[in-house]
Image: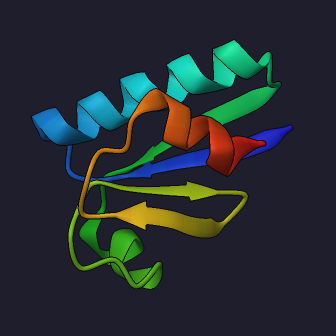
Amino acid sequence: MKKIQILGTGCPKCRKLAQNTEAAAKALGLDYELEKITAVSEIIKFGVMMTPALAVDGELKVAGRVPGVDEIESFLS
Protein backbone atom coordinates (compact mmCIF):
# COMPACT_ATOMS: atom_id res chain seq x y z
CA MET A 1 0.00 0.00 0.00
CA LYS A 2 1.34 3.40 -1.01
CA LYS A 3 1.20 6.20 1.52
CA ILE A 4 0.41 9.45 -0.27
CA GLN A 5 0.67 12.72 1.61
CA ILE A 6 -0.68 16.07 0.50
CA LEU A 7 1.10 18.88 2.33
CA GLY A 8 -0.73 22.18 2.48
CA THR A 9 -3.08 24.35 4.45
CA GLY A 10 -6.20 23.49 2.47
CA CYS A 11 -6.00 26.23 -0.16
CA PRO A 12 -7.58 25.73 -3.62
CA LYS A 13 -4.24 24.55 -5.06
CA CYS A 14 -3.92 22.00 -2.24
CA ARG A 15 -7.41 20.68 -2.99
CA LYS A 16 -6.59 20.46 -6.72
CA LEU A 17 -3.41 18.51 -5.93
CA ALA A 18 -5.45 16.10 -3.80
CA GLN A 19 -7.97 15.64 -6.65
CA ASN A 20 -5.25 15.04 -9.25
CA THR A 21 -3.43 12.63 -6.94
CA GLU A 22 -6.55 10.57 -6.26
CA ALA A 23 -7.31 10.47 -9.99
CA ALA A 24 -3.77 9.25 -10.72
CA ALA A 25 -3.86 6.58 -7.99
CA LYS A 26 -7.25 5.31 -9.18
CA ALA A 27 -6.09 5.28 -12.83
CA LEU A 28 -3.16 3.08 -11.80
CA GLY A 29 -5.42 0.86 -9.67
CA LEU A 30 -3.24 1.45 -6.62
CA ASP A 31 -3.97 0.39 -3.07
CA TYR A 32 -3.22 3.65 -1.28
CA GLU A 33 -3.79 5.73 1.82
CA LEU A 34 -4.19 9.49 1.34
CA GLU A 35 -3.18 11.72 4.22
CA LYS A 36 -3.61 15.49 4.22
CA ILE A 37 -1.00 17.24 6.34
CA THR A 38 -2.12 20.75 7.24
CA ALA A 39 0.01 21.57 10.29
CA VAL A 40 2.77 23.99 9.26
CA SER A 41 5.17 22.38 11.76
CA GLU A 42 4.70 18.99 10.05
CA ILE A 43 5.01 20.49 6.55
CA ILE A 44 8.33 22.12 7.51
CA LYS A 45 9.68 18.71 8.63
CA PHE A 46 9.59 17.70 4.94
CA GLY A 47 11.70 20.77 4.10
CA VAL A 48 8.79 22.32 2.21
CA MET A 49 8.77 26.12 1.96
CA MET A 50 6.02 26.45 -0.67
CA THR A 51 2.78 24.52 -0.74
CA PRO A 52 1.13 22.53 -2.06
CA ALA A 53 3.48 19.58 -1.92
CA LEU A 54 3.22 15.85 -2.55
CA ALA A 55 5.08 13.09 -0.76
CA VAL A 56 4.89 9.38 -1.60
CA ASP A 57 5.95 6.86 1.05
CA GLY A 58 7.56 9.70 3.01
CA GLU A 59 9.63 10.97 0.04
CA LEU A 60 8.95 14.49 -1.23
CA LYS A 61 8.11 14.42 -4.95
CA VAL A 62 7.02 17.97 -5.78
CA ALA A 63 6.49 21.27 -3.95
CA GLY A 64 5.17 24.70 -4.81
CA ARG A 65 3.03 23.67 -7.79
CA VAL A 66 0.19 21.38 -8.87
CA PRO A 67 1.42 18.70 -11.29
CA GLY A 68 -0.98 17.11 -13.76
CA VAL A 69 -2.44 13.64 -13.36
CA ASP A 70 0.06 12.12 -15.83
CA GLU A 71 3.04 13.50 -13.92
CA ILE A 72 1.62 12.28 -10.61
CA GLU A 73 1.16 8.80 -12.12
CA SER A 74 4.91 8.76 -12.84
CA PHE A 75 5.61 9.57 -9.17
CA LEU A 76 3.34 6.74 -8.02
CA SER A 77 4.52 3.99 -10.36
Question: Residue at 53% across / 17% down in the picture?
Answer: 23
Question: Residue at 27% across / 29% down in the picture?
Answer: 16
- Residue 59, x across and y down, in percent: 64, 69
In this view of the protein, which residue sits in the foreground, 7 or 17? Answer: 17
In this view of the protein, which residue sits in the foreground, 62 or 7? Answer: 62
Q: Is residue 23 above or below residue 7?
A: above
Res 66 quadrant in image: top left
Res 77 quadrant in image: top right
- Does residue 32 appear to the left or right of 58 in the view shown? right
- Does residue 19 appear to the left or right of 74 in the view shown? left
- Does residue 3 appear to the left or right of 55 in the view shown? right
Question: Residue at 66% across / 25% down in the picture?
Answer: 25
Q: Is residue 27 above or below residue 34?
A: above
Q: Residue furthest right?
A: 1
In this view of the protein, which residue sits in the foreground, 76 or 37? Answer: 76
Which coloring applies here? Answer: rainbow
Quadrant holding the N terminus: top right
Number of numbered discs on residues:
0
Question: Residue at 54% across / 63% down in the picture?
Answer: 61
- Residue 13, x across and y down, in percent: 18, 39
- Residue 35, x across and y down, in percent: 54, 41
- Residue 6, x across and y down, in percent: 43, 47
